[in-house]
Image (cartoon, coloured by chain):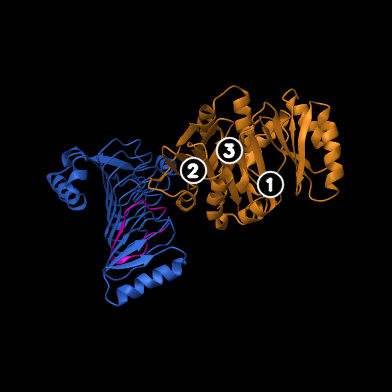
Chain colours: A orange, B blue
Amino acid sequence: MCGIVGYLDRTGGKARTLGCTVLGMLNALGCRGPDSAGVALYGDNPDSQLVARVALGEHGDFNASAAKILRTAAKFAPVADSSITDCYLRFHIGTTAAIQPFIDAVESVEPGTEVVSLGHRLEIVKQVGSPENLEATYHVSEFEGRHGIGHTRLSTESRIDLSHSQPFWGHGYPDLAIAHNGHITNYHQLRRRYEQHGTRFYTENDSEIIAIYLARQLTAGNSLEQAFDSMQRDLDGSFSCVAATESQIGFVKDQFALKPLLYAETGGFVAIATEEIAIRSALPGNYDVREAQAKESRTWRK
Amino acid sequence: MAEVSCAERTIREINSEIKSLIGRGQREITVTNPGGRHNLCVAILEPSHITIQGSAGYYCGALADGSTIEVTGSAGWGFAESMLHGTAIAHGSAGNGAGAAIRGGAVIVHGDAAARAGVSMKGGLVLIGGNCGYMAGFMGQKGTLIVCGDAGDAFADSMYATECYVGGKIASLGTDAVIEDLSAQDIKFLETTLEWHFPSESLRTKPAAGNFKKVVAGRKLWNFDKREWNVWQEAL
């Protein structure tokens, strides 16, 4: 099962906030994924700083860990606007920070620390539980922006915790996020190959390989469209997947169309979801929703 | 004409009300605010005409026997799946497995159908006004599958005896699917069927009956020797 959604606002977000729409879509898919819920939202960060969201582990003294992380981060670039919500530390950091060394340094402060997202606009919040819980803890509906994706998870093969929840950040590539419904059957094979090249895996969730795969493709200079195309060749199994970058949102479906994924496009928005009910319940109006075909992929620029 | 609203009610309540209305002799029912909900109008076993105003989710009209179910929007996965008899019409598009495993009746999709339309049909008609996706007609045992637009990959794979007609291009034929010439009888059948199921203005955009391609089983998979490795390889 699992439910995934994607949304791109084309009107300037006047009617409702981005968070409200994505959460509304996700709520309708709560029954498809009771284990965890998460969103990756792209805000209107006005300055040229990066936003980091760091999970501070499962328990312990979050304030002390946060202080240590901020001291570590400040060695890379100026740090500002830090805040702690539940187990997340959020702060701004200057773009001069070298990304991989910065992540490595932050994550070695305490065991269990993970940079959940990093980007100019991207902010990921996810946790075990329903979309309603996500709203209660993080007030997702107040988030303003133009596009985002979301996920509700029914775990099948790996642990249920924050780290194994989705969306996944494309670790190391700012602003890339993915949410996936399906199974990647050549996961272990690919993972071994990537690990031999020094790629770090944070989870045992097969969906993580998609984030890593796309991050590698985009780092190599390929477009999101090209990366979706080559996914058909390189990844086996069933995947209905949404992905987003700082300026784009898109989806890709595997060659056997094993998992559902529908989309609607109007002058006002683009909406992608596992079930039509998610689009209809969050977005009123008269529009067509169609199911993506096997091998179909599409992208939209904001 | 009775009206049933789906808003703020469970699917069981909605379907129970529809069935009890039919039981009391009400044969014309309009269902409002469907909102893409699943399992709408499942197992309607009496002659009736149900119009769903909007889009339906999974298994709309499944297991029906003798009713006419019309969806003004699109339908999700398993539209009219395993129908015994009757008519199911989606004015928009349909998700995966439209008309899968039907034994009779007609499943009409005015727009496109996603993957696996009409798989394992055991009778009846699946008629797609637009294009169909991957592996339509797979393992079809009887009945007719008509696609007015283009067909996706692996079309009519491993069939028994469903007869398929495609008005547009076929991306690729499935295992043991072969193209056969249209007979005069086939053309007559296509003409009458298209005319019957499509309103005249929509019919104008469909290919002429004589331009359809007919796809049937090559019968190589009906029975073959286990030592025929080529057949095995192809079939798997």
> In screen coordinates, is A184 left or right of B43?
right
Q: Nearer the viewer, residue B199 or A294?
A: B199
Number of numbered labels in the structure image: 3
- Which label is found at residue A272? 2
Q: Residues within 10 Å of mark 1 (few under 14, many from 20)?
A: many
Q: Is the residue at mark 1 from the same chain as the one at mark 2? A: yes
Q: Nearer the viewer, residue A167 or B128?
A: A167
Residue visible at 35% across and 46% down?
B113
User: Chain for mark 2?
Assistant: A
Q: Residues within 10 Å of mark 3 (few under 14, many from 20)?
A: many
- Which label is found at residue A58? none
Q: Earlier in the sequence, mark 1 or mark 3?
A: 3
Q: Amino acid at mark 3?
A: Gly
Q: Which residue is mark 1?
A: A164
> Does residue A218 show up magenta in the picture?
no
Give the alpha-carbon distance from disc 1 to disc 3, as whole Å. 25 Å
> In screen coordinates, is A37 left or right of A72?
left
Picture coordinates of residue A116, whole percent (x, y): 71, 39
Q: Amino acid at mark 1?
A: His
Q: Is residue B168 above or below residue A139?
A: above
User: Chain for mark 1?
Assistant: A
Q: Amino acid at mark 2?
A: Ile
Residue visible at 55% across and 46% down?
A22
**Overall secondary structure of the magenta stretch?**
loop
Picture coordinates of residue A130, whole percent (x, y): 63, 56
User: Chain for mark 3?
Assistant: A
**Which range is magenta?**
B59-77
- Which label is found at residue A145? 3
Give the alpha-carbon distance from disc 1 to disc 2, as whole Å. 22 Å
